[in-house]
Amino acid sequence: MSNTPHDLATATTARDLRAVVRDWRMEGLSVGVVPTMGALHEGHLTLIRSALATCDRVVVTLFVNPTQFGPGEDYAAYPRDQERDTALIADEGAHLLFAPSVAEMYGEPVESDVALTEVHVPGLDSVLEGAFRPGHFIGVATVVAKLLNLVQADHAFFGEKDYQQLQVITRMAYDLNIPTEIHGVETVREADGLAMSSRNVYLKSSERAVASQLYATLQQLADDFRAGGQGSDAGRLELKARERLAQAGFTSVDYITIVDATTLAPVNVYDPQRPARVLVAAKLGRARLIDNISIQPTDPA
Ligand code: PAF
């Protein structure tokens, strides 16, 4: 690991990115990558710090990936500020920013009716977020497979805030024999528990106070589930959690559910030997918030 002060280099083409990484490899340096869509916050900076603690050289990618947004979603409105993001990435001490255009990532269509190659992770990509945002994880898995192939990193870092995404990517990398180790990094929260997210900017100040109830409700559900032990009834507790969110002022709850931490299959009865996770997605005004915590007795959330 190098602690020498250095400038942040920027690449916008696959060719330039590969040339830099090839030179690092020739020097025998290890490489980490932090894929992002920009609008960076403390959660992203924590990923960069984890990468710098593990790898000699760190690439941060900045690409708002159109294929993971559905029709009517916020692709056009997604917050973008490359100048601010670049300064933050440089301050953290990352080595290379890869900020490609859409054409650089996806090329020109060969014929208008020819589909792009897509990566599916059946089972994991169609439940929960996948059911409410059809095609979302196909876009995520496809772009992450492309980014991992482009960077050829030893390690890649993703936030646990997007827990289902982390499972989809881990499984995708395993199934496709991508030789990059996938790391999940703990969610970074505001003082009141709200998970940091680029989309929190959509919250009005009156909604911001309500938003902290998401984490509080997850914690209550996890506590009740553990306390119930073998006699716990996930369905009843999930219903109670939904009611709590509605009473707090959430506009709607897409899901709040306890699942197996790896397969994301529903879990009905508490088993301290079986890692489980509680996942939530709920709307509050214009914002759709997602969050999750671990249910294991000893794990931090
Ligand atoms: O989590 C994100 O910011 C995106 O889904 C990712 C992993 C960078 C892929 O576009």
Image (cartoon, rainbow, N blue to C red):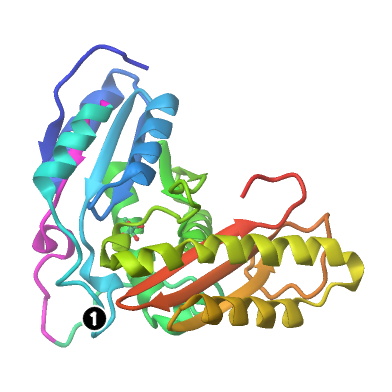
Q: Position of residue 63 (x, y in %)?
A: 20, 56
- Split into 4 quadrants, where in the image is the N terminus? top left
Q: Quadrant of ligand 1?
A: bottom left
Looking at the image, residue 49 sits to the left or right of residue 99; the answer is right
Q: Residue furthest top?
A: 4
Q: Is residue 170 above or below residue 117?
A: above
Total numbered labels:
1
In the image, is residue 248 part of the stretch drawn in magenta?
Answer: no
Q: Position of residue 290 (x, y in %)?
A: 46, 67
User: Is residue 116 visible from the viewing direction of this image?
Assistant: yes
Q: Which residues are magenta?
A: 93-112
Q: Residue at x 21, y 70 (%)?
A: 66
Looking at the image, residue 165 sits to the left or right of residue 104; the answer is right
The answer to which image quadrant residue 204 occupies is: bottom left
Task: Considering the whole magenta stretch, tell me its main secondary structure.
Answer: loop
In the image, is residue 105 part of the stretch drawn in magenta?
Answer: yes
Q: Nearer the viewer, residue 143 or 48?
A: 48
Q: Residue at x 37, y 63 (%)?
A: 208
How would you rate the neighbour count of disc 1 (Cα within 10 Å): few for under 14, some for 14-19, many for 20 or more?
Answer: few
**What amino acid does circle 1 point to?**
Ala
Q: Residue at x 19, y 83 (%)?
A: 114
Q: Position of residue 282 (x, y in %)?
A: 46, 76
Q: Secondary structure at mark 1?
A: loop
Q: Is residue 103 above or below residue 9?
A: below
Q: Residue furthest front?
A: 206
Looking at the image, residue 266 sits to the left or right of residue 146; the answer is right
Q: Position of residue 8 (x, y in %)?
A: 15, 29
Q: Is residue 8 above or below residue 247?
A: above
User: Is residue 12 visible from the viewing direction of this image?
Assistant: no
Identify the residue under disc 1.
115
The answer to which image quadrant residue 155 occupies is: top left
